Image (tube, rainbow, N blue to C red):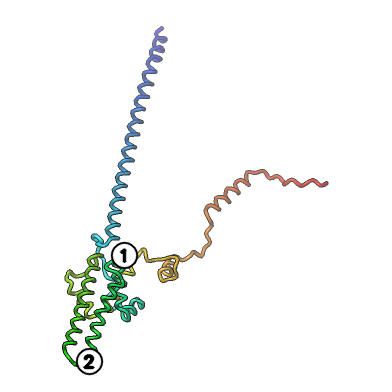
């Protein structure tokens, strides 16, 4: 009788134990789901913050000011003047056109308008020098020198605006920019053009050197890319084909070796 009572008591307590275990498992499962949801929410929030920070940094880097990114001019004013011969020829033979293109890239005016202003200053200088050589009146000489100074101030002002817009390293004084355009106008135009073109500046937006490699062209960028990424001399087999071959070979091993059925001869 005692044994039967113990068996009945154990049978009565078993549903309660099972119910308690199921409730504890349910609570643990709920806590696990809650922890997983909190983890997903925190990861999504961190990713959103990181994405926003990256977008803000890209906007600051690609925009005009450049944020805290400190940039530099491409090459020296005089020593690297002939690095790009096309730019050097344009600056020497057609400085008004070269200046207009630089201003258009930096979004500081149209190419035609800025080129015409530069051309007017040049014409004023040449006319004054010719008039002085013919008449020997010093008034024309002073007019020519004044036109030269005005041209240096004008171009130096826009050089300073380029430095401020793209956060290019340099002195805070605008006098250095004016002096450079006064002493070496062609070399200074070359440096500005190299900086704007090599960094792919379009409509006042600094894209950087990474966007200057065009794979569809036959220029120097394509040649440099091909030199860095030479094709491999060892033939590489596709992993998909290897897997297919491996599967077919395995299937052939397990298939019985049965000779193919020969067609019946009539």
Label number found at residue 134: none
The residue sitting at 36% across, 18% down in the picture is 16
Task: Write down the quadrant of residue 205 in the picture.
Answer: bottom left
Instruction: Depth check: give the residue in front, 106 or 172.
Output: 106
Up-down relation of residue 28 to residue 196 (above or below) = above
Q: Which residue is mark 1?
A: 203
Q: Mark 1 and mark 2: span between their CA atoms?
A: 43 Å
Query: Callout 1: 10 Å neighbours few (<14), some, many (20+)?
Result: some
The residue sitting at 32% across, 44% down in the picture is 44
The residue sitting at 33% across, 40% down in the picture is 40
Viewer can see residue 142 = yes
Up-down relation of residue 254 to residue 74 (above or below) = above
In the rendered view, does 202 fall on the left or right side of 138? right
Under circle 2, the secondary element is helix
Instruction: Depth check: give the residue in front, 142 or 9.
Output: 142
The residue sitting at 35% across, 24% down in the picture is 23
In the rendered view, does 67 fall on the left or right side of 259? left
Image location of residue 176, percent across then percent down: 19, 74
Image location of residue 119, percent across then percent down: 27, 78
Query: Callout 2: 10 Å neighbours few (<14), some, many (20+)?
Result: few
Up-down relation of residue 16 to residue 146 (above or below) = above
Q: Nearer the viewer, mark 1 or mark 2?
A: 2
Task: Write down the quadrant of residue 164 in the picture.
Answer: bottom left
In the rendered view, does 179 fall on the left or right side of 228? left
Disc with the residue nearer the chain's start (1 vs 2): 2
Q: Which residue is mark 2?
A: 133
Under circle 1, the secondary element is loop
Image location of residue 98, percent across then percent down: 31, 75
Q: Quadrant of the N terminus?
A: top left
Image location of residue 216, percent across then percent down: 45, 66
């Amino acid at each position: 009788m005692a044994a039967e009572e113990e068996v009945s008591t154990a049978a009565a307590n078993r549903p309660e134990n099972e119910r308690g275990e199921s409730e504890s498992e349910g609570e643990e499962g709920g806590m696990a789901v809650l922890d997983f949801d909190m983890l997903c929410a925190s990861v999504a929030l961190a990713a959103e913050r990181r994405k926003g920070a990256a977008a803000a940094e890209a906007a600051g880097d690609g925009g005009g000011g450049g944020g805290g990114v400190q940039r530099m001019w491409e090459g020296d004013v005089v020593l690297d003047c002939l690095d790009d011969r096309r730019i050097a020829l344009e600056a020497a033979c057609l400085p008004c056109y070269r200046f207009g293109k630089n201003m258009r890239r930096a979004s500081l005016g149209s190419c035609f308008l800025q080129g015409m202003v530069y051309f007017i200053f040049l014409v004023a200088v040449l006319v004054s020098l010719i008039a002085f050589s013919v008449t020997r009146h010093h008034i024309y000489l002073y007019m020519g020198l004044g036109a030269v100074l005005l041209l240096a101030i004008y171009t130096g002002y826009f050089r300073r605006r380029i430095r401020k817009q793209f956060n290019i390293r340099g002195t805070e004084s605008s006098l250095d920019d004016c002096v450079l355009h006064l002493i070496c106008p062609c070399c200074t135009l070359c440096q500005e053009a190299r900086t704007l073109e090599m960094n792919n500046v379009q409509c006042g937006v600094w894209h950087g050197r990474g966007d200057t490699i065009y794979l569809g062209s036959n220029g120097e960028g394509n040649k440099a890319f091909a030199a860095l990424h030479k094709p491999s001399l060892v033939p590489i087999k596709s992993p998909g084909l290897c897997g297919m071959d491996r599967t077919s070979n395995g299937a052939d091993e397990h298939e019985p070796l049965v000779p193919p059925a020969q067609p019946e001869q009539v």
